[in-house]
Image (spheres, rainbow, N blue to C red):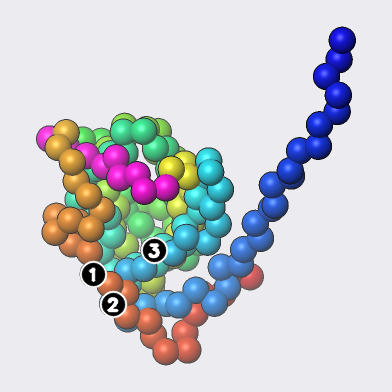
């Protein structure tokens, strides 16, 4: 016997636009632009610096797509592999892969980071395998200072 047809609730698509993202005179910003239970997209802007402390996410995979500027990724527990990435290129980091990156050049680094959407999770560890929260002093977090009226034009 077949079960009667059940009506399901269709999830709603999320539409987002990165145009208008503020560029910075200093520091960095990190804004969630779209999220679901399984995926989160963030636009990250760096006037300088970057993910300054080498770390890995034990359970989360990340994809970084460079939209503007250039980033130097140092890959591996000891940063032994260095790759400079520019616009329209990116890096995929499997869960457990160690990395850090920094903005290189004069322009703001603008990137799209896509990863699993586990809300409230901070599964970051340093090369010593000890917890390394994202806003720790080792990561040298500096709040972003927007340049008045200057934004990223994603089109």
Label 3 residue SS: strand
Image depth: mark 1 or mark 2 in front: 1
Q: Is residue 137 magenta?
A: no
Label 1 residue SS: loop
Left or right: 72 with respect to 61? left
> Callout 1: 10 Å neighbours few (<14), some, many (20+)?
some
In which quadrant of the rendered image does the C terminus lie? bottom right
Left or right: 87 with respect to 130? right
Q: CA distance from mark 3 to mark 2?
A: 13 Å
Q: Position of residue 67 (x, y in %)?
A: 50, 61
Label 2 residue SS: strand
**What range is drawn magenta here?**
119-128
Q: Identify which residue is drawn at 58% across, 73% down.
A: 19
- Determine whether label 3 and label 1 are within 8 Å by CB: no
Q: Quadrant of residue 51?
A: bottom left
**What residue is disc 3 on?**
30
Question: From the viewer's perspective, is residue 146 above or below residue 119?
Answer: below
Q: Identify which residue is drawn at 16% across, 33% down.
A: 129
**What residue is disc 2 on?**
26
Q: CA distance from mark 1 to mark 2?
A: 8 Å
Question: From the viewer's perspective, is residue 138 above or below residue 132?
Answer: below
Left or right: 114 with respect to 103? right
Q: Nearer the viewer, residue 30 or 87?
A: 30
For residue 142, the mark is 1
């Amino acid at each position: 016997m077949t079960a009667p047809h059940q009506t399901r609730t269709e999830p709603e698509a999320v539409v987002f636009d990165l145009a208008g993202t503020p560029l910075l005179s200093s520091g960095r910003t990190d804004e969630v632009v779209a999220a679901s239970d399984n995926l989160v997209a963030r636009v990250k802007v760096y006037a300088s610096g970057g993910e300054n402390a080498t770390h890995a996410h034990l359970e989360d995979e990340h994809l970084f797509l460079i939209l503007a500027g250039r980033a130097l990724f140092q890959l591996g527990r000891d940063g032994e592999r260095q790759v400079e990435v520019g616009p329209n290129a990116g890096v995929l980091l499997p869960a457990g892969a160690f990395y850090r990156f920094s903005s290189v050049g004069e322009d703001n680094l603008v990137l799209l980071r896509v990863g699993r959407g586990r809300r409230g999770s901070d599964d970051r560890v340093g090369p010593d395998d000890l917890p390394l929260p994202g806003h720790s002093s080792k990561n040298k977090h500096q709040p972003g200072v927007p340049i008045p009226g200057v934004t990223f034009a994603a089109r």
